[in-house]
Image (tube, grey):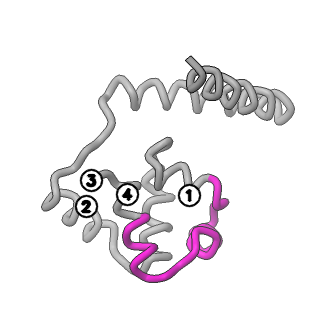
Amino acid sequence: MTIGALLKKRRMEKGLTLEAVALEAGTDPGNLSRIERDAQQPSATLLKKVAQALGVPVTTLYAELESRGVKEPSPEYSRGIQQLQRKFLDLTPGNQKLALEFVKMLGKMQKED
């Protein structure tokens, strides 16, 4: 199990919507959705806020992950995501929008192959 899957599991068990937890944690629902789908890893700060919104300490989440067997992304994957994030944040808002559209287009093209 991954941290994203565990967060989603906890949220669903509490009957909370993605929007409600995201609002409480101070992020947007799309960001939380990417975390739950393991498309992105949460920062330590955001993980703490999401855990608080779910009413559970971060240490409890990690203990549950450890007992279930944690599946974390490889270091190469994590480094790549960090590089993408840094480069993305350096872009203007207009170019960020273009970059997201480009990635979506690549995903669609890949599915067609």
Q: Is residue 102 left or right of residue 77?
A: right
Which stretch appears magenta? 8-30
Amino acid identity at mark 4? Ala
Q: Is residue 71 left or right of residue 44?
A: left
Sequence-wise, which precedes: disc 3 or disc 2?
A: 3
Residue 54 in the image: state x and y as whole percent: 44, 76
Q: CA distance from mark 1 to mark 4?
A: 11 Å
Locate residue 68: give its quadrant: bottom left
Locate residue 26: give its quadrant: bottom right
Residue 83 in the image: state x and y as whole percent: 52, 25
Q: Which residue appears farthest toward the right when viewing the image?
A: 94
Residue holding disc 2: 62
Residue for point 47% across, 55% down: 36
Residue holding disc 3: 1
Q: Which residue appears farthest toward the top when viewing the image?
A: 113
Element carrying mark 4: helix
Q: Nearer the viewer, residue 52 or 8?
A: 8
Q: CA distance from mark 1 to mark 3?
A: 17 Å
Q: CA distance from mark 2 to mark 4?
A: 12 Å
Amino acid identity at mark 3? Met
Element carrying mark 3: loop
Amino acid identity at mark 1? Leu
Locate residue 13: give its quadrant: bottom left
Circles 1 and 3: CB atoms closer than 8 Å: no
The majority secondary structure of the magenta stretch comes to helix
Amino acid identity at mark 2? Tyr
Residue holding disc 1: 32
